[in-house]
Amino acid sequence: MLTARNITKNYSNLHVLKGVNITVHQGEIVTIVGSSGAGKSTLLHILGTLDTPSGGEVWLDDVNLTALKGSLLADVRNKYMGFIFQFHHLLPEFNALENVCIPGFIAGTAKSAVRERAAFLLETLGLKDRMDHKPKALSGGEQQRVAVARALINNPAVVMADEPTGNLDSKNARELHNLFFELRDKFQQTFIIVTHNEELAPLSDRQLVMKDGRIVSGNAEENGALEN
Ligand code: ADP
Ligand code: ADP
């Protein structure tokens, strides 16, 4: 379970996050929507430990992620968090299988086990015949599915996705979104998805609406229980 408590983020006198509380349960698919500049990416980066809050804490089960630093933080991030971005950021000189393996190698898992899981994930995502293709030989939808497999290689507790469908046409966007649900059903995988896609955002377990640095709807706990 990922829990954010009273998260604030300031850039000098700009208050980007103004006390955000979130609890995301295992196997939950949460979408975060809101107008540009509302603080969605900043929040996602803080939940994923890519950025540090000015105040508040992020907990993964009983570990206070906000208290971790340096190589320990990097290890925890690589092992427990998966990331998917609008642009896939696949390494062009490596094929699909190799791209998926990289975070597994960084985690220090046995190479044969990483390769086996990478092949299994690519097969699950319908890319069995594309494993030895370099990114430029793949379609946009295929590239993004490789990025999804890469995000899942270490069996992360949570996958953070920032506009994952932003660069896809509507058919591929729907397919990718459906894939998140398949992965949840198969592996109890948790997803937190920032999206501008108005068709897909409501198709989640919970849609959080951000406005001006706060969650203004979708969060039962925000309206009382956690206030102190
Ligand atoms: P969203 O993802 O909802 O569009 P962001 O989290 O990207 O919003 O940004 C929220 C606000 O924080 C914006 O006003 C943005 O300009 C500002 N911001 C984000 N990152 C920085 C930064 N590194 N330095 C200063 N301001 C920032
Ligand atoms: P996104 O499209 O994911 O919302 P942005 O394009 O807003 O991302 O921001 C990209 C990067 O630039 C982020 O690392 C963010 O922290 C930084 N950034 C955004 N707004 C500002 C700003 N006003 N000043 C400095 N850095 C910013």
Image (tube, rainbow, N blue to C red):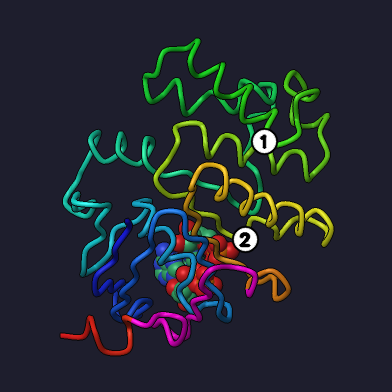
The vertical placement of 99 against 220, above or below, is above
The quarter holding residue 2 reads: bottom left
Q: Is residue 136 left or right of residue 63?
A: right
**Residue 77: within the magenta?**
no
Q: Is residue 141 left or right of residue 115?
A: right
Range shown magenta: 202-220
**Residue 206: within the magenta?**
yes
Q: Residue at x 24, y 75 (%)?
A: 6
Identify the mark nearer the N-term, 2 or 1: 1
The vertical placement of 133 against 3, above or below, is above
Dot 2 corresponds to which residue?
163
Residue 146 — which label? 1
Tell me the quadrant of the picture where the N terminus can be found: bottom left
The vertical placement of 114 against 74, above or below, is above
Q: Residue at x 70, y 28 (%)?
A: 123
The disc labelled 1 sits on which kind of residue?
Val
> Where's residue 222, x and y in %?
32, 83
Whether ligand 2 has any atom under 8 Å from the Cβ at mark 2 is answered as yes
> Where's residue 59, x and y in %?
24, 56
Tell me the quadrant of the picture where the C terminus can be found: bottom left
Circles 2 and 1 in contact, beta carbons < 8 Å: no
Helix, strand or loop for disc 1:
helix
